[in-house]
């Protein structure tokens, strides 16, 4: 990743950084969702995110051309909302399917997200706040 891309990425990881541009907002939302999915699976991520965070993550994945990841986030969130609270077998099946879909959408996980971000930054630098210094 270029030095500028590193700085934009690091800024997106800072929960206290002001977000003034669409690219920065998309990257921050994607990284939050992706981090949670890498930690506990996609079902864990969609259940742990607030609805507006899920919406922002799906929109961010789409902005970066990662439509299959966005679809997985949206579909799993819908299915999770419909799960009966006492049906552990259904929850386990959804968890396995969610992880399979997410892995297929982002085959190289972090590298897939990073590559999509770098391509977007290169094509649309105006979507990101200028770097200080």
Image (cartoon, rainbow, N blue to C red):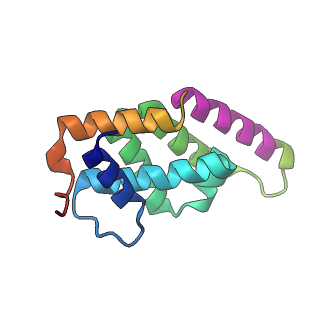
- Asked whether residue 98 is drawn in magenta, I would say yes
Where, by quadrant of the figure, is residue 108 drawn? top right
Percent coordinates x, y for residue 90 in the rendering: 79, 43
Which quadrant, please, contains the C terminus?
bottom left
User: Can residue 64 be seen at all in this image of the molecule?
Assistant: no
Q: As drawn, is 21 to the left or to the right of 39? A: left
Give the residue at x 30% y 53%. 8
48 over 9 or under it: above or below: below
- Asked whether residue 62 is drawn in magenta, I would say no
Magenta residues (range):
90-106
Percent coordinates x, y for residue 3 in the rendering: 28, 46
10 over 16 or under it: above or below: above
Furthest-bottom residue in this view:
16
Give the residue at x 34% y 48%. 6
User: Can residue 128 be seen at all in this image of the molecule?
Assistant: yes
Q: As drawn, is 70 to the left or to the right of 6? A: right
Task: Give the main secondary structure of the magenta stretch.
Answer: helix
Q: As drawn, is 113 to the left or to the right of 126? A: right
Percent coordinates x, y for residue 36 in the rendering: 59, 53
Which quadrant, please, contains the N terminus?
top left
> Total label count?
0
Closer to the camera, 1 or 110? 1
């Amino acid at each position: 990743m270029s030095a500028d891309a590193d700085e934009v990425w690091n800024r997106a990881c800072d929960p206290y950084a002001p977000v003034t541009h669409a690219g920065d907002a998309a990257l921050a939302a994607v990284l939050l969702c992706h981090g949670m999915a890498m930690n506990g699976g996609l079902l864990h991520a969609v259940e742990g995110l607030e609805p507006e965070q899920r919406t922002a993550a799906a929109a961010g994945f789409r902005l970066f051309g990662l439509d299959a990841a966005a679809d997985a986030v949206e579909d799993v969130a819908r299915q999770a909302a419909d799960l009966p609270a006492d049906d552990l077998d259904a929850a386990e099946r959804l968890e396995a399917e969610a992880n399979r879909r997410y892995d297929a959408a982002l085959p190289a996980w972090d590298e897939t997200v990073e590559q999509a971000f770098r391509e977007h930054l290169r094509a649309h630098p105006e979507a990101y706040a200028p770097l200080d210094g």
